[in-house]
Image (cartoon, helix red, strand yellow):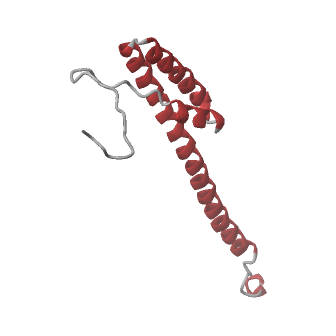
Amino acid sequence: MDTSYPREERPASKRGSPPAPRDHLVWAIFNTLYMNFCCLGFVALAFAVKARDRKVAGDVEAARHFSSKARCYNALATAGSVVLPLLLGALIVTGVIHLSKLAQESVGFFTYQFSGSDDEDT
């Protein structure tokens, strides 16, 4: 007799059945609220809801299919939300560096002093 406390009740599962697929709903909600590129978070949210509905209905294969699509769109949305601002920042930094070098060269050009005298005229 098991007298350990607290008791954890685990549902009996068949050994051969695969686990239920994840629906990635929380990740999709985060991506939807973050307002990412091309509304990929909203598409991921739609597939995550479909995956949850199919899982509740008991259709594991359809739930697995929609879960896979939700994971793919969530990954794309997260990558776009991280990569695009980093790329934009890198472009701004390189543009500022280029403009500062250009400004230094133009200051050197406009402050050029003509040396020599009017001896060439005689």
Question: Which residue occupies 66% across, 66% down?
Answer: 100
Q: Is residue 75 left or right of residue 112?
A: left
Question: Which residue occupies 24% across, 39% down?
Answer: 1
Q: Return the residue nearer the eye: 62 or 39.
A: 62
Question: Which residue occupies 37% across, 24% down?
Answer: 20
- Quadrant (top left/top right/bottom left/bottom right) for the C terminus: bottom right
Q: Return the residue nearer the eye: 49 or 94.
A: 49
Q: Please identify the quarter of the rendering in which residue 96 is found.
A: bottom right
119 vs 87: above or below: below
Labels in figure, total: 0
93 vs 4: above or below: below
Q: Give the residue at the far left of this rendering.
A: 16
Q: Return the residue nearer the eye: 68 or 92.
A: 68
Question: Which residue occupies 69% across, 75% down?
Answer: 108
2 vs 67: above or below: below
Q: Is residue 30 left or right of residue 56?
A: right
Q: Residue 4 at what x, y percent from top left?
A: 32, 46
Q: Please identify the quarter of the rendering in which residue 16 is found.
A: top left
Q: Please identify the quarter of the rendering in which residue 59 is found.
A: top left
Q: Return the residue nearer the eye: 18 or 48.
A: 18
Q: Is residue 6 left or right of residue 87?
A: left
